[in-house]
Image: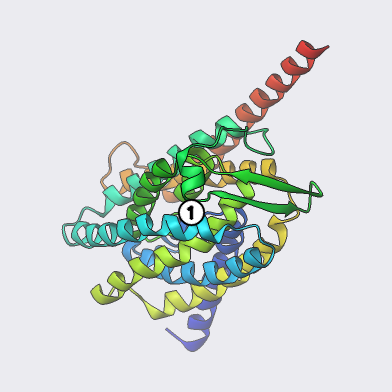
Amino acid sequence: MTLILIIVKFLTIVFGSIIAGFIGSLTGLGGGTVLVPVLTLFYGIPFIFAAGASLISTIATSAGSASAYTKKKIANIKIGIGLEIATTTGAIVGSLTLVFIDKHALIWVVYVIFGLVLLFSLIPTIKKIGKEVPPEMKPDWSTKLFQLTGSYYDERLRKTIKYHGVRWWLGEIVMFFAGFVSGLLGIGSGALKVLGMDWAMNLPMKVTTTSSNFMIGITAATGSSIYWYEGYINLFIAAATAIGVLIGAFFGAKVLVRISNENIRWIFFAILSFLGFGMVFKGLHLINFLITFSLMIQFFISVIISIVLIGLLFYNSKRKEWVRKNAKS
C-alpha cells in the first residue's frame, strides 16, 4: 500500500470517528457504541480489533467531553465514582469473556448480543419520550446514605434543576452489567450507564448523559488493559479513531447544553435502533442464518426499520398529547 493510500485510509477512519464521537458525546453513549458498528459494518475491520480501538478512543472521548461537562457542573462526579466500582469489576469479567469467545470462533454471538443490547436499551427511552425532566419520586434510604442529590443550571430552560437519585442498589446492578458489556463489546457502554441512571435511579437525562461520558473513560481503561495484553490493539486504527472521536466529542459537548432533554431522547432512539438492527443482521449474516443478503441491503433495511419506528413513536407521543389536551378542555 502506497503512502497516499495509507493517508487516505487514515483520514477516512478519522472522518467516520468524528461522526461517532459527536453522536456518542451528545447522547452519553460514548464514541465506542457508535464506532464499533461503523468500523465493522462500513470499514470491514474485524470485531475484536474494532473493539480494541474503540476502547482507546473511548478514553479520549471521556477525557474530552467530561472536562466540558464538569466545568458546567452538569455531570455528578460523586454519583459517577460510586457507580464505577461495579462497572470496572464488570469490565474485567467482560474482557476475559471476549478473549475466550474469539479463541473459540464464536464472534458472531457478540454481534447479536451487541445489537440486542442496543435495542433493549430503547425500552426505557420510549416510555419517557415527551418528558423534559423525570417524574418526581420519593427519596429512599439510599438517597440520604449515599447523598444522591445535586443541581445544575439548564441553559435551555434558563433555570436551576434540583434533583435526587433513588434505588442505588438497582443502579449498581445495572452498572455491573454495563461494565461486563463494555469489556465484552469494546465500548464505553454508555447506553447501559444512561439506562442505569435514567431508569433505575430516576436522574435527569442531562445528568445521566454527562455523568456517563465521565464514567466511560474509567471503564474503558480497565477493559483496554486486557485487550492490550492479548494483542488486540492496532495502533494505526486506534490513533485514527482516537483523533476523530476526540474532535467529534468536543463539538458534541458544545451542542448538548443547547438542546432539550426530549430531543436528546429522539437522537438516542434513532441511532440505537439503526445500529441495533445492523449489528444483529451482521451477526446472523456471518453464520448465514436467516440473513443472507448483502451488507448494503442490510444497511437500508436498518434505516427503513428505524424510520418506521421513529414515525410510530412520534405519532403515539402526539396522540397522547392530543388526548391530554382534550381531557383538560
Q: Amino acid at mark 1?
A: Gly
Q: Quadrant of the N terminus?
A: bottom left
Residue 152 in view:
yes
**In this orientation, which residue lies closer to the viewer: 145 or 152?**
145
| Residue extending furthest toward the bottom | 3
Q: Report which residue position mark 1 lands on.
A: 190
Q: Quadrant of the C terminus?
A: top right
Q: Position of residue 232 (x, y in %)?
A: 30, 72
| Residue extending furthest toward the left | 104
- Eyeballing the image, is 106 above or below 168? below
Q: Position of residue 218 (x, y in %)?
A: 43, 66
Label 1 sits on a secondary structure element that is helix
Q: Residue at x 28, y 39 (%)?
A: 289
Left or right relative to 299: residue 160: right
**In this orientation, which residue lies closer to the viewer: 320 or 21?**
320
Left or right relative to 279: residue 206: right
* Quadrant in the picture for residue 96: bottom left
Q: Residue at x 39, y 45 (%)?
A: 174
* Quadrant in the picture for residue 307: top right
* Quadrant in the picture for residue 261: top right
Q: Residues within 10 Å of mark 1 (few under 14, many from 20)?
A: many
Q: Position of residue 52 (x, y in %)?
A: 36, 68
Q: Position of residue 135 (x, y in %)?
A: 62, 32
- Eyeballing the image, is 122 above or below 26? above
Q: Residue at x 76, y 54 (%)?
A: 258
- Eyeballing the image, is 18 above or below 82? below
Residue 297 in view:
no
